[in-house]
Amino acid sequence: MNNEDKKDMKSVSAPQYVYPPMMYPQGDEINLLDIWRILVKRKKLIVAICLLITLMGSAYAILKPTIYVYSTAVEIGSTSMGGKEAPVDDINNAASKLKELYVNSVLSDFYRDNPNEKKDLLIDVSVPKNSEILMIGSKCSEEEAPLYRQLINKISAKLVADHSEKIKEFRAVLFERIGNAKNRLALLEDNEKQIAQRIEGFDKAFKVSPIDNSGTTALVMTELSSQQHQISGEKFSLLAQITDKESDLKLTHDTRLLYPVEKSIEPVGLDTKMMISAFVFAGLVLGVFIALAWDFIEKMKSQLSTEN
């Protein structure tokens, strides 16, 4: 190899690899200084993206309608037997009926009658913990409130009607038993009056002829007294039954709405200030990411052009 060849080899320098940001060979450590330089270099891009996202988010937050919860509470009716109350329907079973049957039925009827309306209406059914009350409600704007009120009322009315039939049958049984007991009581009172009249007659006969009627009167009086005792016992039992059944009637109540559909005091979701703050943060993060990605792409292009 001559001297000229050696000079040519020295003049040809080895290609230098240009590391993209966050990929400089510093062991496994991230070069924070280089990242900071990139961010300062691309600060206009970051600010522009942050402002754009903030403006778009602010417009959305301001124009977005305020959402409230519109709901009502349904108290499950109960029956009473012997003073022991029991719900007319299991609370979880009633909730399942509402979700799977009545909500779908009411919404299907609404969509059928209003084919041009949106088909994303949502009605929520829930059971508060350790409660025997059903909550039926939905999240919507004040503009949509009349529609949701109507739907919620229709759904709750179906459950009330279903339970009303059962409670109506239960009340009919109680009224029948009370009526039978009162009829039997009236019959016993008539018998009691007749026995009293017979006793009074025997008393008069005994006073007129005490010797001739003493034996017969004693036997009859004993029998009549026994009948009176039996009637008194049965009357006492019937009066207790009537009192119990009337008490059961008072304790039996229908499934009902505890209050009409009402709007929540506070709106749900993030308020306007929180939403704008969230968009500012999102815009800043997105701006930093795009700045780093942009710098990475430019250095990759520079590396490829150098190699070529």
Image (spheres, grey):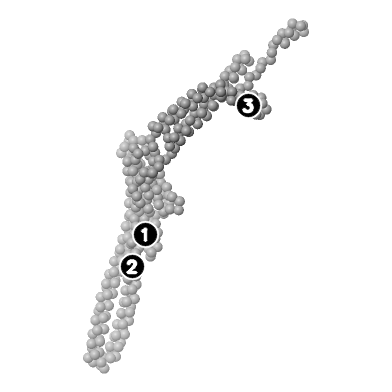
Residue 122 in view: no
For marks 1 and 3, the one nearer the N-term is 3
Q: Quadrant of the C terminus?
A: top right
Q: Give the residue displayed 36% in from the left and 44% down from the top.
A: 263
Report how far apart the C-alphas of labels 1 and 2 lie in the structure. Answer: 16 Å
Q: Which residue is mark 3?
A: 31
Q: Give the residue displayed 30% in from the left and 79% down from the top.
A: 228
Q: Give the residue displayed 29% in from the left and 85% down from the top.
A: 221
In this orientation, which residue lies closer to the viewer: 129 or 237? 129
Q: Is residue 176 left or right of residue 91?
A: left
- Which quadrant of the view contains residue 87? bottom left
Observer-side mark, 1 or 3, equals: 3
Report how far apart the C-alphas of labels 3 and 2 lie in the structure. Answer: 89 Å
Kind of residue at disc 1: Thr
Kind of residue at disc 2: Thr
Q: Whole-percent x and y of residue 230?
A: 33, 78
Q: How many marks do you count on the picture?
A: 3
> How would you rate the neighbour count of disc 2 (Cα within 10 Å): few for under 14, some for 14-19, many for 20 or more?
few
Q: Whole-percent x and y of residue 210?
A: 25, 92
Q: Which residue is mark 1?
A: 79
Q: Which residue is mark 2?
A: 243
